[in-house]
Amino acid sequence: MKRSLLPIVALSLSLSSVAQMGTAPDFTVTDLDGASHNLYSWLNAGKVVIVDCSATWCGPCWNLHQSGSLEQLYANYGPDGTDQIRVLFYEADASTTLADLQGLTGATQGDWLTGTEYPVVNETTLSLNGSIWWPLGFPTVSLIRPSDKEIVADIYDQNYNQMVAAINGIITLNAVGVAEETTELDNVTLYPMPAGDLLNVDLSASTLGIDNLIIMDATGRVVNNVTVGNDTQVKLDVSAYQAGVYLINLRADGVSLGTKQFVK
């Protein structure tokens, strides 16, 4: 996933800039719902914090958002899951409007809010310092360790499983209690395996209301986005895909339900 650069950022930064690593400065921001969030309060409570600094016009940012990785992390390990992490989306372009975030203008890649359960912050005057939080451009996804408040990684180009592994390098994530959901996802069948020119996605036994399939390669790059509609038998043309492992993010009404894996 290639990062997008603001013109002024591209001119002022060197490739050796690694300012995003080091101690994270504290901040307090207010999300679109009017709730206040303080970084050090989260960290002092022992939560691993992920801060996604993106822009609505940024293609790589949209690919990350569409992958559903951060939504799935938040669902599994956030307050309604094991309660071990916090995720924050920070709109890093001060000119962005609410309509942009809603996907209603020409200055955005799409709807960033539907299905996003973690806090979204949009400020007309930015309170976060770009030289720290997005020194190399957008997206920058900072992974912050609670024990010493260090930004230990930028996980902007990682898929869900890689993000989980990175977090497990900081704390041990608890098992996710999603037995019913896992059983439901098991009702989605992919065949043949490995896939040839076509991959069949059988949704007939699922009751999840899946209406969208996002196909990603092993690096988390989105290679296809398929609207399912009312189809229960979906045929995906994967003839042009390189040999390897791929993930299908299953979504309903903009919400990530989980992923299935296939091999080409």
Image (tube, rainbow, N blue to C red):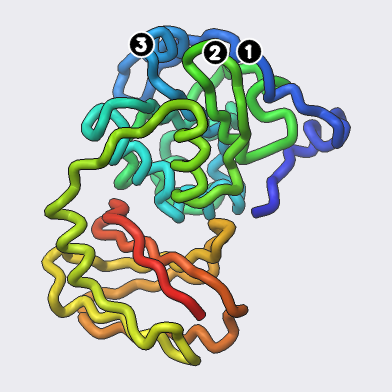
Q: Number of numbered discs present?
A: 3
Q: Is residue 113 left or right of residue 257?
A: right
N-terminal of the pair, mark 3 or mark 2, is 3
Q: Position of residue 156 (x, y in %)?
A: 59, 42
Q: CA distance from mark 3 to mark 2?
A: 11 Å
Q: CA distance from mark 3 to mark 1?
A: 17 Å
Q: Is residue 81 left or right of residue 200?
A: left
Element at label 1: strand
- Say which amino acid is labelled 1: Thr
**According to the image, label 1 marks what residue?**
23
N-terminal of the pair, mark 1 or mark 2, is 1
Snapshot quadrant of residue 214 = bottom left
Q: Is residue 103 visible?
A: no
Residue at figure coordinates x 21%, y 81% from the top left: 232
Q: Is residue 200 above or below residue 229?
A: below
Element at label 3: loop
- Say which amino acid is labelled 2: Lys
**According to the image, label 3 marks what residue?**
45
- Say which amino acid is labelled 3: Ala
**According to the image, label 2 marks what residue?**
149
Q: Is residue 45 left or right of residue 9?
A: left
Residue at figure coordinates x 58%, y 27% from the top left: 94
Residue at figure coordinates x 31%, y 31% from the top left: 78
How many residues crowd mark 1 within 10 Å: few (<14), some (14–19), many (20+)? some
Q: CA distance from mark 1 to mark 2?
A: 6 Å
